[in-house]
Structure formats: structure tokens, C-alpha cells
Image (spheres, helix red, strand yellow):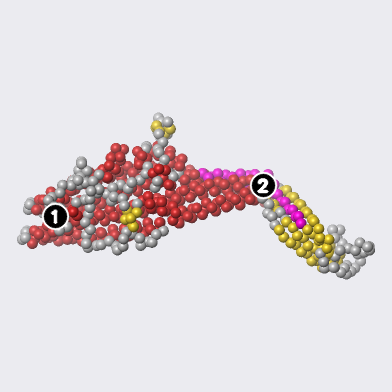
Amino acid sequence: MRLRIAFLGLLLSSPFAVGQPDKPPKTDLPPAKASAPTPLVAPSLAEPDGVPLSIDLASALRLSTTSNLDVAQARAVVEQASAARQRAVSRMLPNVGLGVTYVDHAGRIQQANGNILNVNRTSLAVGVTPTLTFDVADAIFLPLAARQVEEATRAGMVRVTNDTLLAIAEAYIAVLRGQRRLARIDLTLSFLSDDKPSAFRGGAKGLAQLVRDVVEAGGKEAFKSDLARVQVEMLRRNEERAIVLQELETASAELARLLRLDPRTRFRPVEEKWGVVPLPGTEWLLQDVDVLMAFALGNRPELAEFDALVRATGERERGARYRPYLPQVQVAYFDGGFGGGPTRNTSSNIVQDVHGAINTPITPTGEIARFGHRSDLSVTVGWQLQGMGFGNAAERREAAAVNTQAKLRLLAAHDRVKAQVVTTRAAVTRNNERLWTAWQAISDKDGKPAGPVFESLRLNFERIRGGEGRPLEALDSIRGLNDTFEAFANGLSEYDRARFRLLVVLGVPSAALYDPARMPAPPTVQVSPVVGQPASR
């Protein structure tokens, strides 16, 4: 299997060498670097107007890292988490205010001993007022939890970036698949309707032209019904071509949406239609599942994200556990100037009779006098049981349940990653076998387009030209060609998709998905006697 994977790339990149009749039409032969015959475009259904945008997969992936909205939102989430962490740390710092307080009192006031007085007074305070109020449990554990949440969001940004790159790769491969299917239909139509001789048809024209020539030359009456059947087949392929064009336009619009381009943009992938898309990390395809699984469990951003959330919820649980034993602190301080009126005349002894009438007038001066420095400091340290302790117990239970949920999500993510590695690795392997089978039907042992599919076509056309066969036999061979190339086109697309998905499933760095220089090399491992336990050398 490993040999097939490595050898397939060589086969897909090798050009077909086809024997040519004397002065064959150029459109019948593949270009020098093609891996299969270049199909002819049927004139019945033209592609949409406009010059398509040539692009390769690596360029599309690079463009997404700067333009995609999901990636931009993930960056904003990281910024929000960083700000939340900064706010949590700042809870241990005092709030500082600068203000002015003016008081104007007129009327009754009560002394500390209970006496009621009639007082008119004014005062003014100007200064700074630092205040600090915090729960020691929150001051210790909230910054720790916020730090883990920030780490989780950074891992989440990598996850979103990888998912976005995967979505763009799949949209790009869908465009390439549409072009492959379009090429397959045009190839089939060339065998049905081409009016020029071709080496692939033993020097004959397309089947419709061949049967029409026989009918016009006075051939068998049965050939008229055969001509009608060929015409029906041509109409079916044209109808299918319209469907494929619609799918191609839909795939292009989706790719343009992900890249934030005009949805009317048409794309033309520069990769060879009948070759695998070049991707970095091909050496990972040869690794055992145990090696892939161990690497994925250590590098998937989802696991790092869930692990950080487990630690964050653990810090919150510790805060709830220690809250009843840690105090709440309130600190208030004032430093500034204070003054007021009326001022007392110290030259006379004026005392209001506290047992007399309380409406004895005291005329205020209306001025702020004796303004000078003043400072006040108050510190309060206290312990609190929420709901007589039942509230604290409920908080601990709730925090423990949230932490348990985070742990279970992490375990589920581990299982999901391992399953994804197995299924994606199997998709790579089986699609490679699928390609290998279709390739053997298309090409001979030398890599030329002379496999059973083309050989059947050539022989059937030669028999018809020699009057030994019916056109329906060639029609069946053309259908076989169509089905084989459809399977090959779908197999190529699924193989490309599975290889890219495997890299994402492994958790390789995002930049490595489009930059081979950043692709990590597989570890050198040996499989231990215990199945599924790889050990590094």
C-alpha cells in the first residue's frame, strides 16, 4: 500500500504517450504535460462569460488568513479574553478618584448624644479618594482562571483557523472536482460527436458522425435506430453538463465567500486536472495509525482549548472552596483640603442651650473658611458566609459540576480525535486504492492512455468501420469511458480532500498547511509489543 501511495504520484505526473496517425488534429491529442487526453469543449453548452481567476490552493489558503471573517472573529475573541484577564488582575489595585464635595446644611441635626440642634452650616472638601474593595478569593483565583481562558481562546483561534483552511481547501477541491467532471463530460462528448478522426478511435470520427455516414451511405436500417440512441446519449451528456456547470458556479461562489471576493468570481485552479493536488506533508501518509494518533493527541488545538478550560474551571472551583476562609477587604482613603462655616468667634463664649428651644437662629456666614489639609483612612476586613454557609456550599457544588463537564468534554474530544485519525487515515488509503483501480482501467503498464477503457473503444470503432460490429457496442464502451473517468475524477477529489483533512486532523501548524518549510517531520518511532503504544526512539 505504501508503495502504491508513493508510486501513484509518479504515475499521475507522467504524460501520456499516444501513437498518432498521419497529421492528426491537434485537439485529439493531449498536451505534453497532461496525464489524460484533453477533452474537447462541446459547442452546445458554453461556460459562463468572464475571464476566470487563476489560483492555486496555497494562495487561497494564504489569502484566507488575512481576509476570512471567521479568523478575524477568533482574533477578536482572543483580544476580549486578554482584556478580561487584565480586568481580573486589576481587581487587586485601588480605584482612584479626584473630586469635590460641597455640603450646605440648614436646619435640625442630631448630636451623637441624641440632642437636637438647629444648625446652618456649609463645607467643602477637595482631594483624591483611592478606594479598594475586593474579595480575597476572587483576587487570587479569578486572574488564574482568566489566564487559562485566554490560553483556551488562543488555542480556539488556531482551531478556527484550521477549520477555515479546511473549508477553503474543500471548496477549492469542489471547484477542481467540477472542472474534472466537466472535462470528463467533454471527453465523452468528443467520442460521441467529434467530426474529426482521432487515434483514440482508430482513426474514426465520433460515433454519431460515424453512424450518420453509414446511414447516409445506405447502410442497414437498424443503424437509424442506433443513430437515435447515440443522439439521446449526447443530449443526456449535455444535460449533465448543465448540472455540472451549475455545481461549478456554486462551488466558485462558496470559495469566493470564504475568501471575501466577489461571489461572481470564477476560479481556474492551476493544478493539473487529472493529477493529485500537491500538498506538503506527504511523508505523513506512510505513518502507522498509532504514530498519527499519538501526534494528533499532542497537537490538536481543540484538545489544548478544552484542557485550558478544565484548568480555568478548576481555578473557579478552588475559589469557591476557599471563599468562606478568606476575608473581604475594604480600604478607603481621602487626602485633600477641607473647610467650612460659619466660623466661631472665639472672643465670646456663645453656647446654645441644648435644653432650650431648638429654633434659636444661628446665622451662617455663607463662606468657606479655615480651609486646610485633611486626610482620612478606613480599613475593613471581614469574613462572610453566604446564606449562612448554604450559599457557599451551593457555589462549590456548581463550580465542581462545571469543572466535571469540562473534563468530560475533554475526554470526548480525545475520543473524537482518535476516531477522526482512524477514519481519515482509512479514507486516504481506500481512496488511493480507488484511484489505483481506475488508473489501471485508463492507462497501460507504461502510463499511456491505452488501458482497457481506451482499448475497448479503439477496437469497437475499428470493427464498426470494418462492418463487423454494431454502433451500440461502441456506445457501451463510451459509457464505460464516461463512468471510469467519473470514478477517477471523484476518486481524485476525495483523495485530495482526505489528504488535506488528515493534516488538519493531525493538528499540524496552520502555516504548514500551505508552507512546506513549516511542516513538522514525522517522529521516528518503533511500535512497542503492546498494540497501540508507539514508543519514540
Residue lying at 74% horizontally and 61% vertically, measured from the top left: 100
Q: Which mark is residue 59?
A: none
| Residue most extreme to the left | 218
Q: For label 1, count other residues whose C-alpha is less than 10 Å away and answer few (under 14), some (14-19) or many (20+).
A: some
Instruction: Tell me residue 378's x, y (percent).
Output: 76, 52
Q: Please, what is the dominant secondary structure of the magenta stretch?
A: helix
Q: Is residue 512 above or below residue 172?
A: above
| Type of amino acid at the residue the image marks with label 1 | Pro
Quickly name the residue at label 1. Answer: 197
Between discs 2 and 1, the one toward the N terminus: 2
**Apparent side of residue 335 relative to residue 359 in the rendered image (left or right):** left
User: On the image, which quarter does residue 184 sit in?
Assistant: bottom left
* Foreground pick, 381 / 39: 39
Instruction: Look at the image and say whether residue 327 sits in the magenta stretch.
Output: yes
Quickly name the residue at label 2. Answer: 136
Give the residues drawn in magenta, as a range: 307-336
Label 2's element?
helix
